Image (cartoon, grey):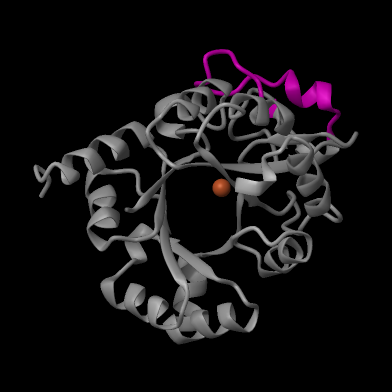
Amino acid sequence: MTRIASHRGGTLEFGDSTPMGFAATARMALEEVEFDVHPTRDGSIIVHHDATLDRTTDTIGAISEKSTDEVRSAVINFGHNSHPILLEELCEIFDDSDVVFRCEFKPGADGVPYANFVPRVMALLEQQDMLPTANFSSFLIDYLDEIAAHTTRPRLWLVSPAVLTQLGTKGVLAMARSRSIPEIGVHIDKATPELMAATLDAGLDFGCWAAHTVPQIQKALQLGVKVFTSDRPSLAIAIRNQMREGKGS
Ligand code: FE
């Protein structure tokens, strides 16, 4: 069965990385919740997509340069007057849920990975008892190496369209194997049966990201990818149910 990951708690249904979106996701009939983490200046871990607050909230500036209170007082756009949450709070929301974490490591606003951040996230997830079921992802190979140094939990490489074009299928798969990366994820619009077959032949798992429209979600399900992320988790569930019942195209 193809797994569904609610992307940032279902951005197009609930706003970007909102407490409401995460709480709704925790009760959904899907398998994973995708989210991104960033450090504050004073050592907290914030669940938010961008490294800055500029695009998604009423506040300007990099999360890593702000205090926890400053970040938590930002109001998320289209987020029903809610504020960015701490990783601890996300753990609490999913405490009783069967939906597992898919935690993405993103670089800072300067494009560089945060130093010594991965072990801090791992320690917090372990302390909250969420590590045993967590999965990890990143576009950055250096982060994937660092993740592997701190946990044996699954990790996947998010391959951007530019990287896929530049390296080609063979180059991407060779790179993944050379770094012992067990799974790749590509943009749904770049996914093809040939790419998926080549990936599986190379002994790697294959998934997709950014399946937000009906045709994109249907494509992911018809390909039978391992997992896909969607900003419309409720829609993805409905289409998967429909296809299971044989009513889908
Ligand atoms: Fe992400």
Give percent across and percent down for residue 184. Answer: 49, 67
* Residue in the image at 52% along x and 14% along y: 80
Give percent across and percent down for residue 237. Answer: 30, 37
Q: Position of 225 compared to 47: left or right?
A: left
* Residue in the image at 9% along x and 42% along y: 247
How many labels, in total?
Answer: 0
Is residue 78 inside the magenta stretch? yes
Q: Is residue 159 above or below residue 130?
A: below
Q: Position of 102 compared to 14: left or right?
A: right
Give percent across and percent down for residue 238. Answer: 25, 35
Q: In which quadrant of the rendered view does residue 146 lie?
A: bottom right
* Residue in the image at 52% along x and 20% along y: 20
Q: Is residue 56 above or below residue 50?
A: above
Q: Which residues are magenta?
A: 66-85
Residue 51 in view:
no
Quick one: 133 or 155, which is closer to the camera? 133
Residue 121 in view:
yes
Is residue 34 inside the magenta stretch? no
Q: Position of 179 compared to 114: left or right?
A: left
Q: In which quadrant of the rendered view does residue 138 lie?
A: bottom right
Q: Position of 1 compared to 152: left or right?
A: left
Give percent across and percent down for residue 223. Answer: 26, 62
